[in-house]
């Protein structure tokens, strides 16, 4: 399965193409649009979320509510495009318009963004050509494609949920969610203002976001994605680029502003003895093989163990500040404060939604590689036979 996205933040529309989906997968636009609305939610979002009401249009690869096996095309229209047609127009400029007269050109790169390096790489003197694509608006289509992947996984009995575990140094208590089922965890998260499952700290996170906004500053945090139902043996130890944890880590790190990733208890392992880290193996007639703990986050040797996969990512504070940092004008080389664009004081809740969907997309790719995947019934049969084999091994 392959996924490509296209489109600029203030262009006419955003597009994703998904190739390699099995035929006969139930799929509707409403399934995808619901996930897009979650991406636009969460306390700390800026005015852009009030302007755009993202709804997806499926224009290929689906007929009468089921995939055809051909490429699926998803499109989301940018409602704000009507205010940017002269700035972001597709057609060449008329002879009476000089490039330097176009409004909202950017020559002062923002620290922490792709502006300067992207301008150097692609030769753009107007750095808007960089930020329009490097914008987190692109994650709209990552979520749209991920919604399709989540539907695919659900059909196979594999379920995902994501939640916020830290914002601005305020941490949720892992013990408060340890005994929750996936459904209970999802219910708590979707009802919370910052998508945190610990109600005791959620309000403190909201207050920290409001405080940062008042200061013209931003906050980052940590999100966690949990996957239940993944069979053992997905991924491979045989070659480095087939390791599942490596692929999931790459997916997490591909999200805008993400700077770190860990599995299970992650970096805490550096402080512990091996006897305190590794998960003992057990077997029962009901479960087959299982681990007595899950400190490794459901992954061993580059493969899934059958235990829940637990992966966390850290998001830096958004670098577009209303109290901007110093920069240099690329035309005059004079020092200036950086350009201000619309921004969120905190996008960690939204980032948790993005994280869930990119992880789901990568896992879907792996499963499609592992099993017969032309149509859903055959894939389900193969997967069930494999699950039985693994249980009785």
Image (cartoon, helix red, strand yellow):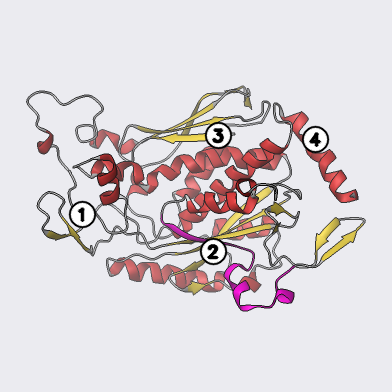
Return the disc, 4 or 3, that comes first in the chain's sequence. Answer: 3
Q: Earlier in the sequence, mark 2 or mark 4?
A: 2
Mark with earlier residue (3, 2): 3
Q: Which residues are magenta?
A: 257-278
Helix or strand or loop: what does disc 2 sit on? loop
Q: Which residue is mark 2?
A: 196
Image x and y of residue 198, in percent: 57, 69
Q: Nearer the viewer, mark 1 or mark 2?
A: 1
Residue under numbered circle 4: 382
The CA distance from mark 2 to mark 4 is: 37 Å
Residue 167 position within the rendered picture, expressed as x and y whole percent measured from the top left: 46, 68
From what the image shows, is residue 393 above or below residue 19?
Answer: below
Query: Which mark's residue is nearer the viewer, 2 or 4?
Result: 4
Q: Is residue 129 left or right of residue 141?
A: left
Cα separation, mark 1 vs mark 2, equals: 32 Å
Question: Was residue 277 drawn as part of the magenta stretch in this picture?
Answer: yes
């Amino acid at each position: 399965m392959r996924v490509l996205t296209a489109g600029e933040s203030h262009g006419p529309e955003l597009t994703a193409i998904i190739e390699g989906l099995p035929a006969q997968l139930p799929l509707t636009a409403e399934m995808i649009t619901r996930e897009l609305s979650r991406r636009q939610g969460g306390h700390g979002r800026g005015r852009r979320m009030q302007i755009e009401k993202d709804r997806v249009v499926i224009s290929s690869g689906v007929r009468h509510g089921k995939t055809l096996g051909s490429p699926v095309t998803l499109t989301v229209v940018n409602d704000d495009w009507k205010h940017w047609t002269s700035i972001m127009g597709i057609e060449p400029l008329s002879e009476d318009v000089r490039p330097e007269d176009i409004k909202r050109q950017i020559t002062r790169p923002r620290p922490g963004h792709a502006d300067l390096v992207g301008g150097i790489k692609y030769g753009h003197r107007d750095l808007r050509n960089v930020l329009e694509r490097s914008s987190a608006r692109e994650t709209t289509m990552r979520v749209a494609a991920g919604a399709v992947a989540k539907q695919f996984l659900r059909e196979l009995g594999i379920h995902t949920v994501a939640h916020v575990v830290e914002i601005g140094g305020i941490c949720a208590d892992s013990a408060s969610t340890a005994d929750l089922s996936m459904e209970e965890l999802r219910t708590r998260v979707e009802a919370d203002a910052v998508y945190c499952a610990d109600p005791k700290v959620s309000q403190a996170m909201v207050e920290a976001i409001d405080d940062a906004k008042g200061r013209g500053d931003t906050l980052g945090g940590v999100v966690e994605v949990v996957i239940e139902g993944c069979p053992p043996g997905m991924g491979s130890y045989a070659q480095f680029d087939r390791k599942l944890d490596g692929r999931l880590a790459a997916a997490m790190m591909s999200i805008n502003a993400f700077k770190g990733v860990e599995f299970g208890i992650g970096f805490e392992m550096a402080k512990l003895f091996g006897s305190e880290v590794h998960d003992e193996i057990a077997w029962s007639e009901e479960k087959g093989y299982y681990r007595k703990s899950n400190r490794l986050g459901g992954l061993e040797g580059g493969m899934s163990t059958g235990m829940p996969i637990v992966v966390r990512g850290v998001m830096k504070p958004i670098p577009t500040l209303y109290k901007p940092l110093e920069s240099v004008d690329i035309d005059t080389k004079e020092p200036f404060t950086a350009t201000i664009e619309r921004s969120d004081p905190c996008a960690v809740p939204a980032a948790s939604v993005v994280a869930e969907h990119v992880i789901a997309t990568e896992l879907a790719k792996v499963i499609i590689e592992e099993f017969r995947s032309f149509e859903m019934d055959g894939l389900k049969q193969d997967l069930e036979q494999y699950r039985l084999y693994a249980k009785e091994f």
